[in-house]
Image (cartoon, helix red, strand yellow):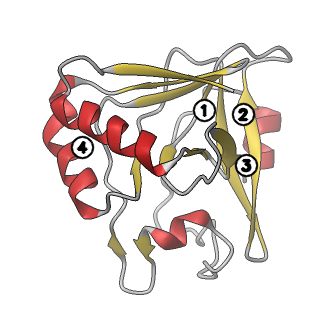
């Protein structure tokens, strides 16, 4: 479906739910990053959606924008796990492309749905921030239709404190 949509409609593509259609993804979840955050068997979703939050990838900059209205939801995300946090984001309407996840026989790959050949800003559907990096830098990776950021534990603690206060940090940038 993603390939058909990408080829025929381009980006942005309206989201249409056809009642009674077959599932786009199988129930095989052992190969997806979201298995850590979602209980597919009981349909219990633990990956919280922060309304108004967007992630944008531009050249060597990843921008995460979190509105002040998401403060309570963000605090709940942080309270669940202080070593790795994740949440779903909104579609970034200012981006000219968006990461999409394509599943083939239980394996998940990243595709980019875009308006044209050149891309300046790409949106993502979720973000994972992991404090398990052993070196002093940071790693940013595209994972399926989202972004994973790995930083050292001490930097994660500083980031979580800043995010909890939401006094200064509403938008933050990471350079690759």
**Callout in the foreground (3, 2):** 2
Residue 136 seen in the figure: yes
Q: Look at the numbered discs 2 and 1 and tell me whether their residues touch, using CB distance below 8 Å.
A: yes
**Callout in the foreground (2, 4):** 4
Read off the residue under disc 1.
13
Separation of residues labelled 1 and 4 (CA atoms): 28 Å
The first of marks 3 and 2 along the sequence is 3
Considering only vertical position in the picture, is 18 above or below 71? Answer: below
Q: Residues within 10 Å of mark 2 (few under 14, many from 20)?
A: many
Q: Circle 4 — which element?
A: helix
Read off the residue under disc 3.
2
Separation of residues labelled 3 and 1 (CA atoms): 10 Å
Q: Quadrant of residue 154?
A: top left
**Callout in the foreground (4, 3):** 4
The first of marks 1 and 4 along the sequence is 1
Read off the residue under disc 2.
113
Separation of residues labelled 3 and 2 (CA atoms): 8 Å
Q: Residues within 10 Å of mark 1 (few under 14, many from 20)?
A: few
**Callout in the foreground (2, 1):** 2
């Amino acid at each position: 479906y993603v390939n058909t949509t990408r080829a025929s409609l381009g980006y942005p593509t309206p989201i249409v739910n056809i009642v009674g259609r077959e599932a786009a993804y199988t129930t095989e979840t052992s190969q997806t990053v979201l298995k850590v955050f979602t209980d597919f068997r009981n349909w219990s979703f633990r990956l919280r959606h922060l309304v108004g939050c967007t992630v944008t990838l531009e050249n060597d900059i990843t921008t995460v924008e979190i509105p002040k209205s998401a403060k309570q939801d963000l605090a709940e995300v942080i309270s669940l796990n202080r070593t790795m946090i994740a949440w779903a984001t909104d579609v970034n309407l200012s981006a000219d492309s968006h990461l999409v996840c394509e599943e083939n026989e239980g394996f998940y790959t990243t595709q980019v749905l875009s308006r044209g050949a050149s891309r300046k800003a790409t949106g993502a559907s979720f973000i994972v921030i992991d404090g398990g990096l052993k070196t002093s830098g940071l790693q940013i990776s595209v994972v399926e239709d989202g972004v994973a950021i790995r930083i050292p534990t001490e930097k994660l603690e500083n980031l979580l404190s800043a995010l909890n206060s939401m006094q200064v940090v509403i938008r933050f940038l990471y350079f690759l």
